[in-house]
Image: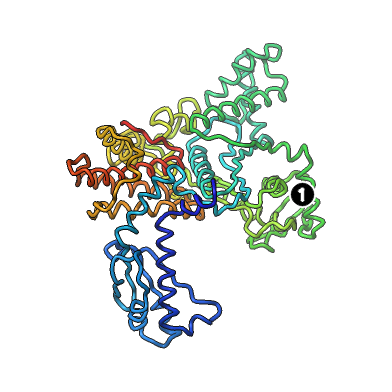
Amino acid sequence: MCDYVFRAAMNTFSDNKSAVAALFEDALFSAFPALKDETPRFEVTVEKPKNPDHGHFAVNSALQLAKKLGKRPRDIAEALVAALPASPLLASTPEIAGPGFINVRLSRNAETRIVKVIHELGETFGHNNVGHGESVMVEFVSANPTGPLHVGHGRGAAVGDTLSRLLRSQGFHVTREFYYNDAGAQINNLAASVIARLKERAGIDAPFPEDGYRGDYITEIAERYALENPADANGEDANAVRRFAVAALRHEQDLDLRAFDVQFDSYFLESSLYADGLVEKTVNQLIANGHTYEEGGALWLKTTKWGDDKDRVMRKSDGTYTYFVPDIAYHVSKWQRGFTRAITELGADHHGSLMRVKAGLQAMQLGVREGYPDYVLHQMITVIRGGEEVKISKRAGSYVTLRDLIDEVGRDATRYFFIMRKSDSQLTFDIDLAKSHSEDNPVYYVQYAHARICRVLEQWGGEISSLANADLSPLVSPYESDLMRALADFPETLALASRELAPHIVTNYLGELAAKLHTYYNAERFLLDDEPLKLARLSLIVSVRQVLRNGLSVLGVFAPEKM
């Protein structure tokens, strides 16, 4: 996409905001010439007022400059307004409110221009090139291949995938990666659990491992292993059983993620860190850099140097590494692969290791920026049905699986519910609400707004493309103004959600836009005898439909034409 389109996609709101700032800057240096030569130069701040009745924008420069200029804020505000150059951008002379706030109202042409921009840019509206193609690694899900994905993994999948889509919309080159913990005690327990079921199947008396996995899926894996490996139906070859079980569960997790419309660009095996010697190289480098010491037969990392509350053991006295050491090595590999920015999406239960990994990366002295990687944490989920908590899956035995939710409420509702709250907040997933066709169901409410517009356009039966050139001057109702202001906010909403790594900002926006559309739909008619007004309103709702579609696309949620 050309730079012009990227700039335009930042939208009319941003353009108008910059233009208003430029007008007031001219007025400021005209009214107070001495400020022009100061370093650093004063920058006019233009904000969106919380109350739309106060106008499109608010300027508080008068309050900021009162001390410097030794004048009352209101006197400064009056001087600024008096010095403002004439502009078709403004509907009227800005109003001075309170101690010196300046409220600005846009002209009708400036306000309606957003509709034209959306018609022009279509599915690229809201995108921009602030990322300039920077390579970003987004690692998410990264579930141990020891069982089906649970709802916590599902929330991580929805958050990570939406972050990837958001960052791509802002011009970053994004790589999605899944890190497989295919080494360690949990994998050994998985193999031991399958072997126990194989022996049980063969009538051999063998104890089930105390820390084993007891879901029905373990029995299923054992049955398949015995059928495909009749020579080892009793599970004597532990390595073969381990490889088979991990491969089976990896395949199952892949199928669940595809059903969730989540795909990855690369997969990274924890075992490769040991096979390739990266863990050993990382430890040796930390020792060479002087950031370790030995005590009590163990090797310690001086993590307190980078803000940790105490130093941490890297290598235990028995020679094995603690769990955060391969995590450091893994993130070293991200940096070495050229990812100048890395985002790791994890369950909140991993919070304790974050400081250690960041400290270890700084101690490696690779030139990694402070704070690398960025972490996005999600809290676990409580699933309820009929007001009661649902705790287990028939198949998994101890938890609710992602597939359970997808099969019961559908992909769209599952994805939307997982990201409609801030990811580090607790989430209650109400199955009954997610399945309901009511305005209380947030995803249905947004999708229904899109379908409603499609129904109106179907009844009209005209050529949609012709509405791009409609005369928008008849759009004078407060409902229409409210909608256009909301449309103009969309690019900044995507930009903010991307900067804050917060997908819920987009769901909040879509809910508010849908509410404004439903209010408009209930208050006004569209298929009127008044042809100019009809075409203007249809042009407006086509732009609303486009923004709803663009927003849902970022969330990985379908925009239905009929419901």
Q: Position of residue 392 (x, y in %)?
A: 45, 31
Residue at left offset 35%, top offset 36%: 434
Residue at label 1?
282
Q: Using the image as rendered, state which of residue 105 and residue 508 is in the foreground.
A: 105
Residue at left offset 52%, top offset 23%: 216
Q: Using the image as rendered, state which of residue 153 and residue 334 is in the foreground.
A: 334
Q: How is the image coloured?
A: rainbow
Q: Quadrant of residue 247?
A: top right
Q: Position of residue 535 (x, y in %)?
A: 26, 43
Q: Using the image as rendered, state which of residue 62 and residue 389 is in the foreground.
A: 62
Q: Position of residue 476 (x, y in %)?
A: 23, 55
28 shown above or below 532: below
153 shown above or below 229: below
Report the quarter where the N terminus lies. top right
Q: Position of residue 225 (x, y in %)?
A: 64, 17
Mark 1 is surrounded, within 10 Å at the Cα level, by few (under 14), some (14 to 19) or many (20 or more) other residues, namely: many
Please tell me whether mark 1 sits on a helix, a strand or a loop.
Answer: helix
Residue at left offset 26%, top offset 53%: 473
How many marks are shown on the rendered structure?
A: 1
46 shown above or below 116: below
Q: Using the image as rendered, state which of residue 14 and residue 450 is in the foreground.
A: 14
Residue at left offset 46%, top offset 25%: 394
Q: Quadrant of residue 20?
A: bottom left
